[in-house]
Image: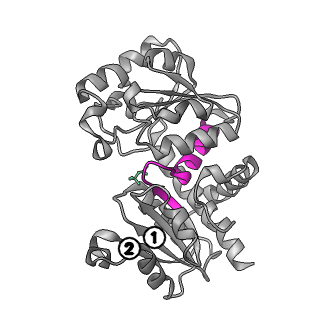
Amino acid sequence: VNHLLGIKYLKEKDIQLIFETADHFKEVINRPIKKVPSLRDITIANLFFENSTRTKLSFELAEKRLSADVINFSSGQSSVKKGETLIDTVNNILSMKVDMVVMRHPNPGAGIFLSKHVNASIVNAGDGAHEHPTQALLDSYSIREKLGDVKGKKVVIVGDILHSRVALSNIFALQLQGAEVMVCGPKTLLPKYIGELGVKVETNLRKALKWCDVANMLRVQNERMDISYFPSTREYTQQFGVNRELLESLEKEITIMHPGPINRGVEITSDVADSGQSIILDQVENGVAIRMAVIYLLASKIKQ
Ligand code: CP
């Protein structure tokens, strides 16, 4: 398959190949000259129909480190505003001899839809509340780097599971690699289908943190929130926010992750986010090597 549409479509061996390839590229980007000439013959369009800082810049940097030609598109400054459809937009861009499309879109399944209608490799950079596969890959890669392996580790994903593409992709990725997965959040922010995903469910944050090796703190997605989901931000923070006092009361050291952007003081306090227990900026650093690996492996199939 010439696409990365979701972790759901990967096997464990695919993840291991991506990680081994990322290990090589991580070494490359720590050299004085951070580039390789591998993709000089490949052109990539980054299409962002939704805001992004980390994913957008990380993909662009990954592509440039591989020497691909790169064009960037933000829907807000485009002819989408004049009513052009997704397929017309992408087909017009592809007619400029583009080989690969990286796309973030607010609609779940947008990448899958596009892959059926256009002739290019598609990489899903986040589609609504569905999947964010490269985020889950960089998250698992960061756990592997910190704890040696993902297999057998206990990982709790905390917070707004209902609106989170990061949660779903992480659940699939962690389970494929043999981790134990728990979700923890208010009942109103757990999807109805959570019982079908084979994860433990906990609504008490303290119990969840005492159980886990790693806590991945999700952002409360206010932009996707209906007021009825939860009474107040203050109540959320009291019950599901992680702070230094709570961590110290656990009497063991757990690893803290967050996909960003952080609502400081809501799901996580600064004295946790910026502490030695946090690998939040390692996740961002690893995102470049992971995205280089994904693009390199997909581009090798285009070249065949
Ligand atoms: N983690 C993540 O997807 O961040 P951005 O929305 O800034 O890309």
Q: In this view, does 70 lie to the left or right of 19?
A: left
CB contact under 8 Å: marks 2 and 1: yes
Checking the image for residue 46, the label placed there is 1
Crowding near pointer 1: few (<14 within 10 Å), some, many (20+)?
Answer: many
Q: Earlier in the sequence, mark 2 or mark 1?
A: 1
Q: Is residue 152 left or right of residue 4?
A: right
Q: Position of residue 206 (x, y in %)?
A: 45, 15
Nearer to the camera, 304 or 183: 183
Residue 214 placement: quadrant = top right
Checking the image for residue 69, the label placed there is none
Q: Is residue 163 left or right of residue 118?
A: left
Quadrant of the frame with the C terminus? bottom right
Nearer to the camera, 279 or 174: 174
Residue extending farthest bottom: 96
The residue tagged 2 is 73
Q: Where is residue 40 in the image (x, y as percent from the top left)?
A: 60, 81
Q: Is residue 75 above or below residue 99?
A: above
Quadrant of the frame with the N terminus? bottom right
Where does the magenta region start and end?
124-146
**Residue 75, visible in the rendered structure:** yes
Prevailing secondary structure of the magenta residues: helix
- Helix, strand or loop for disc 2: strand
Asked if ligand 1 lies within 8 A of label 1, the reply is: no
- Helix, strand or loop for disc 1: strand
Residue at left offset 38%, top offset 24%: 242
Q: Position of residue 47 (x, y in %)?
A: 43, 69
Q: What residue type is labelled 1?
A: Asn
Residue 127 in magenta?
yes
Nearer to the camera, 242 or 219: 219
Nearer to the camera, 104 or 212: 104
Residue 263 in magenta?
no
